[in-house]
Amino acid sequence: MSQATQQDAATGVIESVSGPVVTARDLDARMNDVVYVGDEGLMGEVIEIEGDVTTIQVYEETSGVGPGEPVENTGEPLSVDLGPGMLDAIYDGTQRPLDVLEDKMNSAFLDRGVDAPGIDLDKEWAFQPEVEEGDDVSAGDVVGIVEETVTIDHKVMVPPDSDGGEVVAVESGNYTVEETVVELDSGEEISMHQEWPVRTPRPAVEKKTPTQPLISGQRVLDGLFPIAKGGTAAIPGPFGSGKTVTQHQLAKWADADIVVYVGCGERGNEMTEVIEDFPELDDPKTGNPLMARTCLIANTSNMPVAARESCIYTGITIAEFFRDMGYDVALMADSTSRWAEAMREISSRLEEMPGEEGYPAYLSARLSQFYERAGFFENTNGTTGSVSVIGAVSPPGGDFSEPVTQNTLRIVKTFWALDADLAERRHFPSINWNESYSLYRDQLDPWFEENVTEDWSETRQWAIDVLDEESELQEIVQLVGKDALPEDQQLTLEIARYLREAYLQQDAFHPTDTFCPPEKTHSILTTIKTYNDEAFEALDAGVPVEDLVSLDSTPRINRIGVQDEYEEYIEELKDDITEELRGMY
Amino acid sequence: MKEYETINEISGPLVYAEVDEPIGYDEIVEIETEDGRTLRGQVLESNDGLVAIQVFEGTSGIDRNASVRFLGETLKMPVTEDLLGRIMDGTGQPIDGGPEIVPESREDIIGAAINPYSREYPEEFIQTGVSAIDGMNTLVRGQKLPIFSASGLPHNDLALQIARQASVPEEEAEGEDSEFAVIFGAMGITQEEANEFIDDFERTGALERSVVFANLADDPAVERTVTPRLALTTAEYLAFEKDYHVLVILTDMTNYCEALREIGAAREEVPGRRGYPGYMYTDLATLYERAGRIQGREGSVTQIPILTMPGDDDTHPIPDLTGYITEGQIYVDRDLNSQGVQPPVNVLPSLSRLMDDGIGEGLTREDHSDVANQMYAAYAEGENLRDLVNIVGREALSDRDNKYLDFADDFETDFIDQGFDTNRGLEDTLNLGWELLSKLPKAELNRIDEEFIETYYVDDEGEEVEATAD
């Protein structure tokens, strides 16, 4: 967005300044209009109008801004620039590209009052028309294609608010995003550039029931608690339990076409890690650089709080735009608690009546509005696309009963509960298998059964049963010790140990183990099940349990994860286990 | 510059004055009392005609007749390389009787956020000589790693040990000087504690490379909100303009947060959890995030904030919000302390988020990550079994369980307990780790690559297969 020129009619005067909240008098503005505040032109948004006084949240640091300075209204709601050039980009919370800001400010520190368009307005793209003169097009229709990155073809669409019409002029060639690529008989000129207000969902025809899983390559997620393409998931956990690593893993390995990663109020060094790592990683689907399908939004914890409030919306609007093109988009938001806290901070500066724990009463409404923008959609142009939303939650003290976690759980259908105890034992990913759930299991099972293996749900149920039994037995063990248990229960504990160590645990930093395809996930389970079945046979035949739990071959189960050529390894291992056990009776 | 005698309300640390010109938010204010004292403050809220001023030195002695001057600029820290070796009070005035400071430039103490795009990811291993940190929770240059402690625990000794011993072996090997410049920001600590630090700096000669900002327990609480910002502004200047590697020790963050709460209460703000202001996360982030490295700059800012957890409770808002911002935490543990373990670091809840990228082949040693993971798992298992031993006794446990119990004991006495004066190199730390792990059967070491087991596992004969690497 470029800075508006001076317009007297829309100019007001600052009355008071308190942190990110500024009030102005005599400003002619509508709710949620973007305004420029003070002599330096800091970007802000109207959040309250009371009589002659307008309250503005400012997206930049307000030190030194004082009453009497002007406030200028742009008359537009907070919008993002949509068009080719968003992938491989890194934005702040109001879609200012951070690399451009570095150049413009000529400093490693973020200065104030500098604005930059979200997409490069000068770059030329090679436009390939998909329509011909004489074709009728309507809102949402694809009129052409540009290659945005090696991985993604950017589809140029008729804006959603267009009335459509007959194409009268279209030609392939190189264009900047603002140049007209298609002309309609109504006189409307279509360019690659669209603007869309971030707080309004982009239109679609219908939201449908998702039936395909978003494969993450993480065993505990794909195997036990899968999320659908177009689904929603929450990852709550105390600090140090692995939220961010899990989010990074999903951003790296999820089989989505596009990944939008929103770092909302998180650590600067962590965002740098993403910026440095992702360009070097390959997209598991195409082998191209991972950044070619990724859009990063980084609003670190020390960047202005109001921009933290908006970064979530910026992210989801970009995600919806790619969904409209027919892509499967995954949006990771780390962390939605910081977003909620930003709302709380602004709300308390407005002296609104607080709800639970000081959060504004509209917290629940805002959270559900956000998650409802996820889904598997039929788009206005007839394609289907999805936006999956995975939100990290950072509950204070790891207490899941706090408002943000509770309100999130009421909406999302997948819950990956991170557990500090598991993290302390270095059980990673530290997703608690007793507390987590996925309501997508049943609707995704047919896909797994068709595409991976027929006994997918059956084997999973066996693993869940063993793990459930283990957690019951552990309570007894804590009281009387393991040796006091009957032999079959001791054996169950050993089987469960392998489930935990070889199946549930996964090393995100190991080059091979970091991504586990569903086939491998399943084979690890069947290996442990082979051990289970053979060992119980042996137990029935009178072999003492001490011998059954100290086989030479079974420790190799723990190494399946790191094997590249796992099929052969597993076949051999299964044979060895069977042989060793059958040799005992 | 206009002078006002228009104070119309004084409440706690706040003064409200009427003005007839626009005053900028965060601007610096001087208040002169009738007895000739000059107090400094900062604009907290600026309305048309009325400003709220937070007075650093406290409001006692101010009356309605005191005069108020607005300096027209936000608080600046005069910075120069000559600050090294100096001792300042909590508002940046020298108190060591040394020469006047001639600043090279004056920097706004509210630092701008570093553009994440301009940062460089920290991955240079800092050897602190403390096994519990180097081996298990490795610190890297540009990291912010707080010490979570509580009253009566030796967190200061640990911080001093780190400040004294921290070095970068890689650069030492190349003959470079890798010593850190230490910036010490004290907030509300006692004179005795401050002396402990300053004496130690003097004794070891580190004072020459240090800048001390001391806001003591009897100094005004409100001043505490400024002290860490002065310290960090100085740190950023030395690191990013003068190429120093800076280690910032901030203690005690709990006192800082108490000061925030005091100001919030005086302004009658809607309180958040336990009365702390709702913006405390944002406020703490503006401190902690001022650590890191910047592309193309030589220096770095590494932060070790210390906080004492009220009631040893890490779900208290102060440690909780800190943990969500910093890159890990080091827990000082009361039980280990009473057992005489020095330093009493409980590695289980401790964490260094930047460890994985700072260690391994070419950085520390190839087996570092595996060894750390295995020791974590083994210690956690042994620690878990201790509860059971209390009920059923050791005899009732299996041989395997007993080995883990022994491991946990040895881990505490041999690995963690090294004393505050021992500077243990990383090789020694890892070899010691292998010595302990080798008491477990090879098959139990499922987190270690088989190759490393071959190389480093110490067999019964006590012969290590491979000599130590260089």
Image (tube, coloured by chain):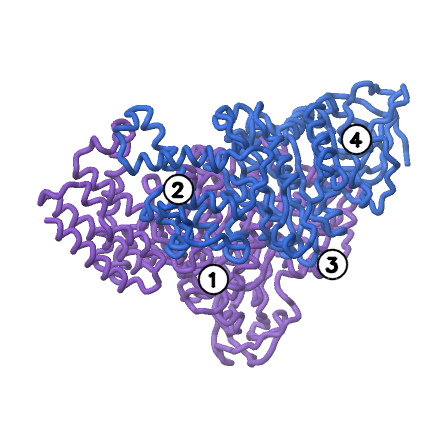
Disc 3 with disc 1 on a shared chain: yes
Q: Colour of chain B?
A: blue
Q: Which residue is mark 3?
A: A106
Disc 4 with disc 2 on a shared chain: yes
Circles 3 and 2 in contact, beta carbons < 8 Å: no
Q: From the viewer's perspective, is the residue at label 1 or at label 2 nearer?
A: 2
**Picture quadrant of residue A6:** bottom right
First reached walking from the N terminus: tag 4 or tag 2: 4
Q: Which residue is mark 2?
A: B377
Question: Which numbered disc covers residue A258?
Answer: 1
Total labels drawn: 4
> From mark 3 to mark 2, how far is it between C-alphas?
47 Å
> From mark 3 to mark 1, how far is it between C-alphas?
31 Å
Looking at numbered disc 2 in the image, what kind of residue is underneath it?
Ala
Q: Colour of chain A?
A: purple
- In which chain is the residue bearing label 2? B
Q: From the viewer's perspective, is the residue at label 3 or at label 2 nearer?
A: 2
- Disc 4: CA contacts within 10 A as few (<14), some (14-19) or many (>=20): many
Circles 3 and 4 in contact, beta carbons < 8 Å: no
